[in-house]
Each structure stands twice: as structure tokens, then as C-alpha cells.
Amino acid sequence: MAQGAGAGPSLADLMPPPDATWFGELDDPEEIDWVDWSDLRWADETWTHGPSVPEHSEPVERAEQWGWVPGEGLLRELAGPGRVLGEALAGVAPSPGLVAALCTLDDPRDPAATVWWIDPGGPRCESRALDEAELTVGVAQAWDRVASWACAQRETAVQRARALMVSMPSPDPVGVPRWSGAEAAAGELAAALRISPRSIDARLERGARLHTAHPGTLWLLEQGLLTWAHAQAVVEVCAPLTDPAHLAAVEARVLAAAPEQTPAQLRRSLVRAVARVDPAGHAARHTAAATESVGVRMVPLPDALVSITAVLPAPAGQTVLGALDTLASALRDTVSGKGDGEQDGGEGRGARPATRPRVGAAERADALVVLAAALAAHPELVTGVLAAEPARPLVRVTISADTLLGLTQHPGELAGYGPIPAGMARALAADGTWARFVTDPATGQLLDATPHRYTPSGRTRAFVVARDQTCRHPGCSAPAETADLDHTAPFDHQDPARGGPTTTVNLGPRCRRHHNLKTWHGWRTWTTPDGAIAHRTPLGRTYTVAVPPQPTA
């Protein structure tokens, strides 16, 4: 559609370039001033309506003039002499041009699919089907980056709309009693975005914190390097912090690794960082929560079930879980000695038919019922339980030497939970059995272990578990304590001297699912010189998982 002389471009005809910023007052929703700061012609002036855009130019020409790369042009640039690589497509920063490119790609299953899927020199993977799969994975990654970018633009627009409406005068020239621009903005945005009035308040608060307190996170979201779930984790975990210096310190500690982490992994890193930069606040929040939240509650559920929840201090919770696991193992051994069908099916004891497979959570539930039923049936046991000397905590705590000596108040790390206040860590350490771990002061990584309570095989396992903390597969957070110890270079059972050695360098925890993925589904691994584990997928992609720093480093 042609523009009349002096008329500004409409949003329908000319969208802004990807690196443009909004400039000036918004008088007409169809007319917006945009400045492309990457174009030197506009370095010292504001784009004015009129001759800057040819009156009868076509939309594509205008898009090219303003820095857009049409979809096919971007694909041609990525393809080079061969097909488009999924990894190359996934590496493109999100923009309207990337959206156009993604919309240009055909479904490879379509017989009329374009040449973007075919490499004239032959397949780069083992077959054309794998080539197509590799590109399709890249397309999914690229759309994921676009979705993150769109979320950032959406939240910026929401905050801008809120600011404009908050500053609006009362609709009545005489003035409306109790007029609130903030309430008007919340009501308008809730209706427009189809959000409940309660949810819009939280949404606006999260968006405001993202824009004012977390500039690094917002930039990564705009670049498509973090998802909206990552950004929400940053805002939620950092909510207790009010000091801008603390907020900046948390971002400095976690954002460098955030693009390679899952939202759950980032959340754990954030929890540790918040505790580290604000140890006094972390301890105070624990004290308040222990006073207000601890308790046991029962909630009815459908299908004749109930949910019993116990909110406990973290060490007590780990002790309870360890005791239930011990009792569950004893019950399993008892049941395994019976013949089929001999298992007690009484509902009061929480037993299940012998034909149903048991899982850890179900066994713990049975153990809890057995324990409670035994105490209810034999009240005389209660006196003995109360008189018994408490056992040492069934937990593993990592604490730095300076915190142990009271020189600093850095948080400790409770295995299976996360950071705990320094005072709680010292109290647990005073009752514990010790194992010495030496860390590299430059990297915070474990170098050696000399446990005084394990046999050699137990020593090796303890070292690897303490060093790696979780499964070493990309994105997996399964605890190392429950994982298999996998040989990165495969162990040769016929000639052990030729295969991968059983050493701490060649061992890494791998949960059963990812152990099977490596053994049976074509994933290959090797150890890099700095101790990281590299993974090569059947599609030829490589993912590297570095040795994690110790949480108290």
C-alpha cells in the first residue's frame, strides 16, 4: 500500500528492524518513530516522515532498505555450497528475518520440498534422513529462540503500555474521586491479555523487576539465549533481594553459564548465588520460615487417597527420608523372601498386590505406614523411641574450612537439597564423620580425596559423587548419589588393560536413562583435557559438560 507524502509508515506495511529502538511520543497507534542505530545515516538525527521512504516502494524493497534480510536470502547465506545446517540456523539471532526464513523452509517429507534440505555433495550425516533430522532439530531450536525473543518484546510492550496508562489523566476533566492509573492499567491489560485480575498484578510485578533489576537477564532473553522459564526463575529466586549490588552480584555469578543450563539447573545456581551474596539475609529467612512454616498436614485427595505433607528444616527432612529408605529396604528384603501371592494385602499397612512393580516413593509410603502402625499398636515403643540417643544425621554436608572455623559466614551445601546457613552447616559438621576433599582454589574443582571411612572402591565412588554432584549428561540434574558410575571410555571386559581405566578421571555419574542412551542409542563420549565430558549425538552434534565447581567455592 502506497504511503501519501508526509505520512508515516504503518505497522502493517513496515515493521521495525530487529535492532531498532522506539523513539519519541506515541500519538497515533499506526504511526511510530523508529531509529536504526546501526545505520550511520541516522546516528545524529531522528527519522522523519516523508521522503525517507520512497512513496511507491514495495514492502520487500523497504524491508531491505531498513536492514531486513528476507527469508530466502538468509537461507542462501547459511547454506553456502551445501544444505542448511541445523546448528547454523540455531545460531542465528532472533529477528523478523529469521522468522521469514523459518517460514520459508518446507516439510522435508513433502516431495516438493526445496533444496534447503538436500546437500548436492551427499549427506553429511550417515543418510539424508539424518541430515533432514539434524536440520529439523535446528529449526526447533531457532523457533525456540524466536519464542524467547517474542516473550521479551511482549513483556517490554506490557510494561510500556502500563507506564503510559499509569500516567494518563482522569477520564473526567473535573476529576474522578479515587482515580488510579495503576488500577486502570491493570484492568485494561487483564482484559486484553485474557488474564485474571489476580494474575495480572503478579505478571506486572515480575515484568517490572525483569526490566529494572535484571538487565543482563532481559538482554539474554531478547537474544533468545534464555527462555521465559529461565527469566522467571531469575526474577522469582532473586525476589528477596533489595540491594542493587546483591542483584548485580547474583547475575554476575550465574548468567555466564545460564544459556547452557535447564531452568531447573539455573534455579539451583541462583539459590546458591543468593545465599552466597547475602548470607545474613539467607539465615534470617531460614529462621523466619522455620518458625512459621514447619508442620505436618493432611489434605484429602480423590479416589480415597490423602496427601500428608511434612514441612521440616532441610537436615531433618533428609534424616526422615534416609530412615524411611532404610525401613523400606528392610521391608523389601522381607517381602522378597515370600512366595508369589504371600504378600499381606491389608489396606491398613499400605501393602500392594505382589504383581505390581514397586518404586521408591511407593516403598517409602509403605514404610511410613508400617512405622506409624507399629507405634499405634505398641504404645510402649514410644517411650523407648523418645529415650533413644539421636543418631548422627543421615546427611552429607559440604562446608568450606573458613566457614567451619567461623572466619566467614558462607553457606554450606546439604547434599540433595542445596545451600544452608553457615550456622546450621557447622552444627551438622560437629556431629559428622569426616572425609577430606582438596579443591583447586582457582577453579573450585575437587582435585583429590582422602576419605577415612571407605574401602578403596567406596573412596573412588565418594570422590566422583562429590566432584560431579549430578548426572553428567547434558541438562540432567539427577543426583549423583543415585546414578551409575559410567566409564567415559568404555571398559574392556576381555582385556581391562586395553579399555578405559576405573579411575576418577574416567568415571562419571550417569542416571540409568542416560547410561542406556550412551550404551544402546548411539551417543559417544570422551574426556577433554580440562576434565569435561564431550558428548556426540547420532546427528553429529557435540555437547560438552564441564566439571562443576564445588557449591561452596
Image: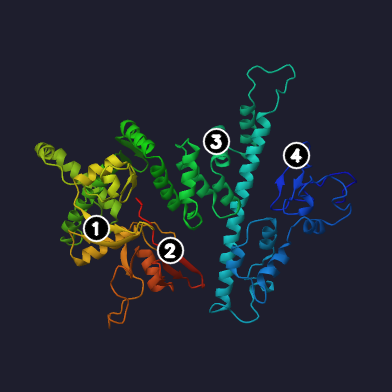
Residue 219 in the image: above or below residue 377: below
Q: Residue at x 65, y 41 (%)?
A: 157
For the residue pair 381 and 15, the one nearer the viewer reads as 15
Per the model, the C-alpha gap separating discs 3 and 1 is: 52 Å
Per the model, the C-alpha gap separating discs 2 and 3 is: 35 Å
Residue 447 in the image: above or below residue 319: below
Element under disc 3: helix
Residue type, numbered disc 4: Gly
- Report the residue marked by disc 1: 354
The numbered dot on residue 205 is: 3
Horizontal arrangement in the rendering, residue 235 relative to residue 463 (left or right): right
Residue type, numbered disc 2: Val
* Mark closest to the chain's N terminus, 4 or 3: 4
Q: Nearer the viewer, mark 2 or mark 3?
A: 2
* Mark closest to the chain's N terminus, 2 or 3: 3
Residue 391 image point, x, y percent: 16, 45
Q: Nearer the viewer, mark 3 or mark 1?
A: 3
- Is mark 1 in CB contact (under 8 Å) with mark 2? no
- Report the residue marked by disc 4: 24
Element under disc 4: loop
Q: Nearer the viewer, mark 4 or mark 3?
A: 4
* Mark closest to the chain's N terminus, 3 or 1: 3
Q: Residue at x 37, y 69 (%)?
A: 516
Per the model, the C-alpha gap separating discs 1 and 4 is: 73 Å
- Is mark 4 in CB contact (under 8 Å) with mark 3? no
